[in-house]
Amino acid sequence: MRTAYSVETVRNAERELMARLPEGALMQRAAAGLAAACAQVLARVAGRVYGSRVVLLVGSGDNGGDALYAGARLARRGAGVTAVLLAPDRAHGGGLTALRRAGGRVAEGGAAGSAEELIARADLVLDGIVGIGGSGGLRKEAVPLADAAARSRAAVVAVDLPSGVDADTGRVRGDVVRADLTVTFGTHKPGLLIDPAREYAGSVRLVDIGLPLPGEAAELEALQHPDVARLLPVPAGESDKYRRGVVGIAAGSARYPGAAVLAVAGALRGGAGAVRYVGPAGDAVIARFPETLVSDQGPKRAGRVQAWVVGPGAGDDAATVAQVLAAEVPVLIDADGLRLADADAVRARTAPTLMTPHAGEAAALLGVGREEVEAARLDSVRELAARYGATVLLKGSTTLVARAKGGPVRVNATGTSWLATAGSGDVLSGLAGSLLAAGLSAVDAGSVGAYLHGLAGRFAAEGAPAGAHDVAAAIPRAWRDVRGD
């Protein structure tokens, strides 16, 4: 499992480790990993390290020191390295000395040409302007350098985090550096995994520098294939359809029958043994999926289920939502159900509840603008989970799953922009609801559902448009990919 830690936790771990190491050893570890990553990039973009042109953008913090020491290593391998100092009086002294001794240059007073011209000719630009403690966007003097790097043909490598983004929250509050690669040290930072900051990080490479990080202090968790494989429900030899779990789907309306069909499509591929459908779209559901158990008696009389999904395409059917919320089994609330659900009824539930809003729905629940949710996704999902006493899955390019009682937030990035299509969320609801019925906890059902849904979206699209039904059909392929079958 990939984890991310707050700036405070990272700083504390760094201090603990530095107390046990010779002075400067930790920075040298980071610089060695950074230089190795840069050398690989130069081999790709310039064909070699020797004779390549590297520009270091150096701020006053330790990130600037990392950049200078890494630049010295590249200079010793024959690269032409020039450092542009944004705060000459506060640049890292040891790093400057090492760079000069290795044959690197420092752009001072225009002697080495303007910084923009240097960047325009560079093969690689190393962003060491601001470290993980920075926030609020780039300062005025750094903006032209970031713009020049974006216009250039150079590969841009960020040191630990793209300068200007918020490490702890993923917020972007001004001009920032856009990197092709971010080399981060010790652990991931939340801003490298959460949009909008994540899109500025490019590919992310973690360099292990031996930080003593406490597992219980992680801010984020990101499941990987082995983690998901361990959570997938697999029937035993004595299993039957009821032992595997039955998921109830209360969805659809005369206006939106397709939402019911798509939710059932996701549920049938989510690991539960049977799917019960309740609602006005029964004819459409049974025509597409004859294995579905269809009822028109309402949730109370539908028969035994181990979990409910309510809300996709429900229109204004508040009565059905209320009946489902009264059930003493896990419930997933999506789409119209989020608008219709009584907040006090959600908070009063004793069985697990999983809410699955997109940014617009989350904004309505929080009483803020959508842009505020999109700018502060981590804060928003935590606030929703705390306010409703429920597990909350906030959909998006990086889906977040927050537990009702706090703790690490799960982040998922398996998706693709092709999943931004009508009905895709209905498929996810059915899939995650089926996982709930199969026995997964709310946070695991949401996380595994998002992971499989994202993979299925990639497989369905493969670089071309795909509909929600294509995504549902690709879920078994995603399941097999995770299990290595």
Image (cartoon, helix red, strand yellow):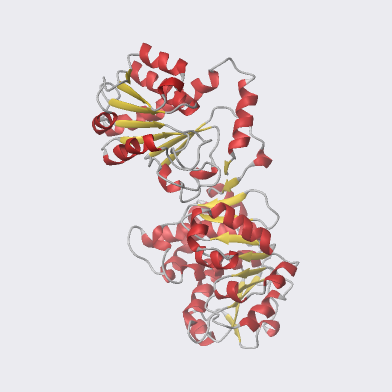
| 101 on left or right of 113 | right
Q: Residue furthest top?
A: 101
Residue 244 image-quadrant placement: bottom right
In the rendered image, residue 357, in percent from the top left (x then y), is placed at 55, 65
Q: Quadrant of residue 48?
A: top left
Return the x and y of residue 200 as percentages of the image width and height: 41, 45
| Residue 110 visible in the shown view | yes
Q: Position of residue 460 (x, y in %)?
A: 40, 62
Closest to the observer: 61 or 248?
61
Which one is in front, 304 or 299?
299
Q: Nearer the viewer, residue 136 or 31?
A: 136
Q: Quadrant of the N terminus?
A: top right
Residue 95's place in the image compared with 313, above or below, is above
How many marks the image carries: the answer is 0
Can residue 479 be seen in this snapshot?
no
Q: Between residues 142 and 217, which one lies in front from this camera angle?
A: 142
- Residue 361 location in percent, x, y? 54, 67
Picture layout, residue 228 above or below residue 108: below
Residue drawn at x 71%, y 73% is 345
Q: Is 73 located above or below residue 386 in the figure?
A: above
